[in-house]
Amino acid sequence: MIEEIFTCTAVNSPENVSRIYKYEFRRIWKNNLDKNKKNLVWGIIFLALGSFLLFYRQPFGYFFVGSGLMYLVMFFNYITYYGKAKRKAETVLKKEAEKLQHHSKPLFWELTPTHFRFSDHRLDLKVAWKEITYCLSDNLYLYITIESLMHVVISKENTDEEHFDKTMAYLKHYARFQQI
């Protein structure tokens, strides 16, 4: 059982924050965009089938053409929604980078047997272990989720191997692992 208090600090630069934000955005949207490609495929299939049935004056042709158009509208609607979300994420990233340049403060986290404490340029948290889940993504980023409301991302590039491994040991012992 881990009983010691472990603290770590890491450099918090606009480049690191930008890299983490962009990685997180791509990770979240990758699965959604792959699912949206299915709408395009189904739209094309239904339009082709509906056109074939309309050619032979079958009443089901209108149903399939309508369904194909619906899938295509959903596909293009989702693409525009993705574009809006990407532009919004870029503006949020620019604001965060500006805040970080004006209020530069290193990342700090403290791990004890009773709580997890995290501090950066915008927040200072102290949370009991029962409220924390964590996961490791691509062996580069450590995502710590606090009651599904807040996420803390620790980059392996910001810390040395020893601090990252100790943080992982604490999380394995006290927090709950979740797959992403």
Image (cartoon, rainbow, N blue to C red):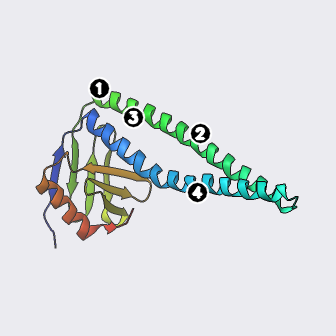
Look at mark 3 in the image and give the residue it sits on.
93
Residue at x 20%, y 59% (from the top left corner): 167
Q: Report the front residue among 118 and 95.
A: 95
Separation of marks 3 and 4 at Cα, in angstroms: 30 Å
Look at mark 1 in the image and give the residue it sits on.
102
* Residue 77 image offset from top left, x and y in percent: 64, 43
Look at mark 4 in the image and give the residue it sits on.
38
- Mark 1 belongs to which amino acid? His
Q: Nearer the observer, disc 2 or disc 4?
A: 4
Residue count near mark 2 (Cα–Cα under 10 Å), binned few <14, some 14–19, many ≥20: few
* Earlier residue among tags 1 and 4: 4
* Earlier residue among tags 2 and 3: 2
Please report contact status of discs 1 and 4: CB closer than 8 Å, yes or no. no
- Give the SS element for disc 3: helix
Separation of marks 2 and 4 at Cα, in angstroms: 16 Å
Instruction: Answer left or right for 147 relative to 137.
Output: right
Q: Nearer the observer, disc 3 or disc 4?
A: 4
- Mark 3 belongs to which amino acid? Leu
Look at mark 2 in the image and give the residue it sits on.
80
* Earlier residue among tags 3 and 1: 3
